[in-house]
Image: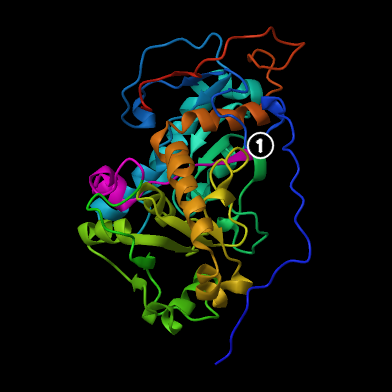
Amino acid sequence: MLLVLPVSLPWTPLVLDPLPPITWDSTWPPPLNRPLCLPKIYVYPDDPRMGEFQMKNITVDDADFFMIPFRGASYLTHCWYHLSRKDDCEAENLYVTPMMDHIQNDYPYWNRSNGRDHIMVHPMDKGSLYYMNTRERFLNATFLTTIGDKRHVGIESHRSRGFRDITIPSATAILDLSHIDPALYVDAEGFPRNGSHRDIFALFSGLYGNVNRTDAYSSGIRALLREGIDMLPGYNVSSHFDNEVYAQLLTRSKYGLAPQGWTLDTTRIWEYLAFGVVPVVLADGIIEPFEDDIDWDSFIVRIHRSEAHRLDEILKSITPEEYERKRRAAWNHGRQTLLSHDAWHLIVRHLCKTQDHLPGMQTLAGGKHAPIDYGTTTIKTSMFP
């Protein structure tokens, strides 16, 4: 029998007094209750060419930004899932072109800046690339997109436009379609309500069974799941779970695997955060929502593709203390900031950084604008709760 004795260090570590506090605007992550500017965002009103919206009748005298309530994703979703069509139902001819004609010809605001102070929503995997024949008309606008990708990949649909795009959280089937309430499963501290422990080490639900190492899909990462990871004790890996079963499994899980698919982002991250599960992100080059202001690394585990074959080893090397730190951060910071609060205040922070040259916008910088009281951003619409 080999007796292993504890190793004693030949020195005593030196621990100094902590550094003094610094001003709020020099810290990172920043205090998110301190806005960078207080812009006014005008949302274009109802018009048959822009779809069906319920808007307030407002003026635009002092707007800093202009929100186009673009519903291309809704148009395509209705085409594919409700009409069971395989084409795009002439989305560009019947929706995008009339909508942009209306914005650019019936209003003066687009042409004043060539669209640089306009905002559009482009969710789904290909973003604006669903509209290849018309996208040149709105490329100057800022896109709110769920796809954030730093890579210089050959497939253009995976590319992001740096500071021109703002990556936002995506909707998920279990939270936004089935409306399952995590509060029924976990308590205010993120622990299972039934008093049980999180006895599932790692969870995954999604496509993986037919993925090969050389596939473009997931860059081959998901192939590793069927090469033994799905059979490991403590892992629960499946191509699909019923929503109620999935909610119960999320309640019991410590880590949630989030390997890339066709795009780097996956909706699983938001399901994991909602249930207090620590996300394990396997997506090199991903741009997480609002990562300039949010310390994602405090509550996720990142594993590069080159290390993905060591996934089990890496996760099991995390000490219980480090896991608990990430779990608390995921629950108290990641979940509350990204899921419990209105995302508009984070969107506006990004707008403030990229558009602070706008002459009429109130900012917190000295000199050009007078000091202002802290408050909430004015968004002139009832469309976005």
Q: Is 181 colored magenta in this rendering?
A: yes
Q: Which residue is drawn at 36% across and 26% down?
A: 383
Work out whether residue 305 can be spotted: yes
Note whether 177 is above or below 115 in the view shown. Answer: below
Is disc 1 surrounded by few (<14), some (14 to 19) or many (20+) residues within 10 Å? Answer: few
Q: Name the residue under label 1.
A: 28
Colour treatment of the image: rainbow
Q: Which residue is drawn at 66% across and 37% down?
A: 28
Closest to the observer, 293 or 38: 293
Whole-percent x, y for residue 350 in the image: 60, 32
Quarter of the image with the N terminus in it: bottom right
What element does badge 1 sit on? loop
Q: Is 204 colored magenta in this rendering?
A: no
Among the 4 quarters of the image, the one containing residue 115: top right
Note whether 44 is above or below 173 in the view shown. Answer: above
**In the rendered picture of this protein, how many numbered marks are placed on residues?**
1
**Three-letter code for the amino acid on which mark 1 is drawn:** Trp
The range drawn in magenta is 164-189
Closest to the observer, 53 or 216: 216
Q: In this view, does 369 lie to the left or right of 90?
A: right
Whole-percent x, y for residue 124 in the image: 44, 50
Among the 4 quarters of the image, the one containing residue 369: top right
Note whether 135 is above or below 37 in the view shown. Answer: below
Q: Residue at x 37, y 52 (%)?
A: 271
Work out whether residue 205 can be spotted: no
Q: Is residue 163 left or right of residue 84?
A: right
Quarter of the image with the C terminus in it: top left
Whole-percent x, y for residue 84 in the image: 26, 57
Among the 4 quarters of the image, the one containing residue 362: top right
Whole-percent x, y for residue 367 in the image: 77, 11
Q: In this view, does 7 lie to the left or right of 274?
A: right
